[in-house]
Amino acid sequence: MQFQHGIGEMITALVDAGLRIEFLHGYEFDGFRRFAALQRQDDGTYRLPAGRPRVPMMFSVRASLDGTGQR
């Protein structure tokens, strides 16, 4: 699924909902070929070709209500 929201907007919404951000990780690959320049890898992910800038294309976030990992 693809969303048209900036990462700052999403993280702010989590914080505004009372959640504590525990981590935010960016990944230089994607699970889908969203751009023609992405090349399929042996593991099934898609990455920009060698020599291209490394940019995060996907991210994961963990947030909790009490900061202990329990939601």
Image (cartoon, rainbow, N blue to C red):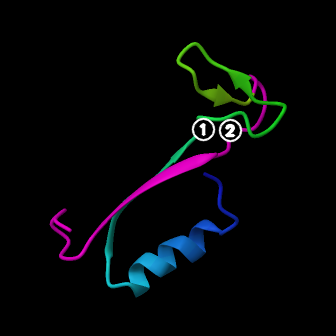
Q: What stretch is highlighted in magenta?
A: 49-71
On whether residue 4 falls in the magenta region, the answer is no
Magenta: predominant secondary structure element?
A: loop
Name the quadrant containing residue 38.
top right
Q: Is mark 2 on a helix, strand or loop?
A: loop
Point 53% across, 18% down: residue:
43
Point 59% across, 66% down: residue:
7
Q: Which of marks 1 and 2 is nearer the N terminus?
A: 1
Q: Is residue 14 above or below residue 36?
A: below
Point 75% across, 38% down: residue:
53
| Label of residue 4 in the image | none
Residue holding disc 1: 28
Q: Return the x and y of residue 61 as percentages of the image width and height.
A: 41, 58
Q: Return the x and y of residue 27 as percentages of the image width and height.
A: 54, 42
Left or right: 52, with 3 as reference point: right
Q: What residue type is labelled 2?
A: Arg
Badge 2: how crowded within 10 Å, few (<14), some, or many (20+)? few
Name the quadrant containing residue 65.
bottom left
Q: Return the x and y of residue 9 as percentages of the image width and height.
A: 58, 76
| Label of residue 54 in the image | 2
Point 72% across, 33% down: residue:
33
Left or right: 67, with 41 as reference point: left
